[in-house]
Amino acid sequence: MKVGIFIFLFFSFALLQPTKPSSAKEVCIKKYCFEWPILKDGTVLKKVSHEGVWSKPDGDGPFPALVIAESCGGSNDAVNKDWPVFFNSLGYATYTPRTLKRMGHKYCPNLKFVLSNKNRIEMLNSLYSALDEISSKPYVQKNNIGIIGFSLGGINIRDMGEIKDLKSAEGRKFKFAIPVYGNCTLLEMRGDRIPTLIIQAEKEKPRKVKLCHKARDQKFSNVTYHEIKKAYHAFDDKRFTKISTDVAGNKMLYSQEATEEAKRLIKKFLGTL
């Protein structure tokens, strides 16, 4: 009887442990090492509580929709107002979950926080819980929901794109993705290969640009790639009226021209879906 209890407790404990990918490899960036991909294929993410900003076009719908994944800058007018208004004008509803706030932060505190698999898995739990939540709205087309992510949000999209059959707690998947000035490191598109528009900025760090060009040159069948000339990181964020540097060393500067170009690219991409 004791043996049976021990076996039961052992397997119960094992099931509660974080899921590691069966074919993971250790990857190191600077002094930080982590397993990659961050989750195994077929993972069903946890449902977590969240709050955020909702928007919708006028009328009852149902409308296609987007989850907006915030950057390391956290809550700001770009993800709370500017982008939702733009998407509403195209007939899309949006939801911007407060992912960093849920984790106890207003913004990314350091590079170690960003590179932590544990933290980024929690971000995926939040984003996929947001997918379930927006799917429950009567004004949303439940099978036509994508995700757009900026910087850290773009990294979250990169992460999910390397995991096959990744699902929300209710079994849902995003139908398309738009990472904006995210990261192309380790980008192999080994996941479900949903339609993806990658928007990058020409004035990113040279190594980052080089890695994104390497990804671009692989010509993934599901990817449309565009680099905005003369644009810096965070080109859509009006807070950066002069060049600033974030925790990852990215130089940030707002550009109305770059933002308008990104909007044109996104409108054209959505028109192909």
Image: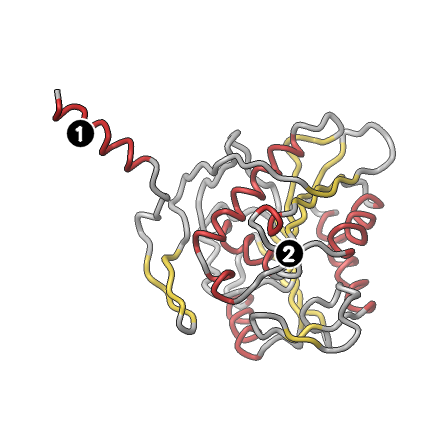
Query: What SS does tag 1 mark?
Result: helix
Quadrant of the rendered structure where residue 251 is?
bottom right
Question: 267 left or right of 126?
Answer: right
Quadrant of the rendered structure where residue 65 is?
top right
Q: Residue at x 56, y 46 (%)?
A: 194
Q: Label 2 sits on what residue type? A: Lys
Quarter occupied by the C terminus: top right
Tally of marks:
2
- Which residue is at the front of the view, 34 or 247? 247
Above or below, 163 against 260 in this view is above
- On the image, the x and y values in percent for residue 237 come to 75, 64
- Which residue is at the front of the view, 189 or 159? 159
Q: Label 1 sits on what residue type? A: Phe
Name the residue tied to disc 1: 6
Q: Is residue 150 visible?
A: yes
- Label located before the other in sequence (2 or 1): 1
- On the image, the x and y values in percent for residue 256 come to 83, 67
Name the residue tied to disc 2: 106
Above or below, 235 against 46 in this view is below
